[in-house]
Amino acid sequence: MEKYKKFNRPLYIAFIDYAKAFDTISQNAIWEAMKKYHINQNYVRVLKNIYEGSVSQVKLETRGPNIPICRGVRQGDPLSPKLFILVLQYIFDNLNWQSEGIRVNQDQLTHLRFADDIVLFAETSKRLEEKG
């Protein structure tokens, strides 16, 4: 930011915080990402056993029917943030953003990520809109 200010160049920044981010991850995306990054199949098999076939129920006076859980990662599980980050990495690796973002030394910086918070950078408002 200091360099852009020093050289009087425009800099556009968007801050994104995904609401309920961990609840929105497709379980299929988890398996695809694990395959792409060559995660040991024993780990994949264990996680599939945990996630596939998971159900929930509503209990008032009696138990309701099973509700299949097909999205999201398990709340409170220490592995959940890592699975979320794995899927997010998979998504960002498939975006064609090599020429996007801002120049920092010899590198192109397109975004910063921390868990479910993302910061996008662009030199024009149009480019920022296209990325967001």
Image: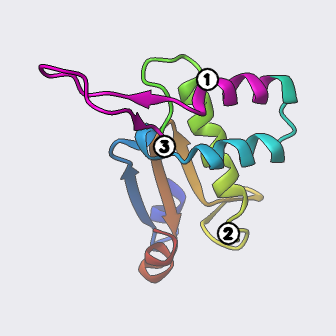
Mark 1 / mark 2, whichever is N-terminal: 1
Q: Amino acid at mark 2?
A: Trp
From the top left corner, tell me how far across and down residue 56 is, in percent.
Answer: 37, 28
Which residue is at the far bottom?
A: 126
Q: Exactly how many numbered labels are in the figure?
A: 3
**From mark 1 to mark 2, how far is it between C-alphas?**
35 Å
Q: Is residue 73 visible?
A: yes
Say the numbered circle drawn on residue 50: 1
Is 46 placed above or below 21 here?
above
**From mark 3 to mark 2, how far is it between C-alphas?**
27 Å
Left or right: 111 in relation to 96? left
In the structure shown, which secondary structural element does the residue marked by tag 3 occupy?
loop
Quickly name the residue at label 2.
Answer: 97
How dense is the environment of label 3, judged by Cα within 10 Å: few (below 14), some, or many (20 and up)?
some
- Between label 3 and label 2, give the one nearer the viewer: 3
Mark 3 / mark 2, whichever is N-terminal: 3
Q: Nearer the viewer, residue 50 or 58?
A: 58
Residue at the location (32% across, 27% down)?
Answer: 57
Q: Per the image, is 49 magenta?
A: yes
How dense is the environment of label 1, judged by Cα within 10 Å: few (below 14), some, or many (20 and up)?
few
Contact (Cβ within 8 Å) of mark 3 with mark 2: no
Q: Quadrant of the C terminus?
A: bottom left
Residue at the location (51% across, 78% down)?
Answer: 127
Q: Amino acid at mark 3?
A: Arg
Left or right: 75 in relation to 121? left
Quickly name the residue at label 3.
Answer: 71
- Residue stretch in magenta: 43-69
**From mark 3 to mark 1, how far is it between C-alphas?**
13 Å
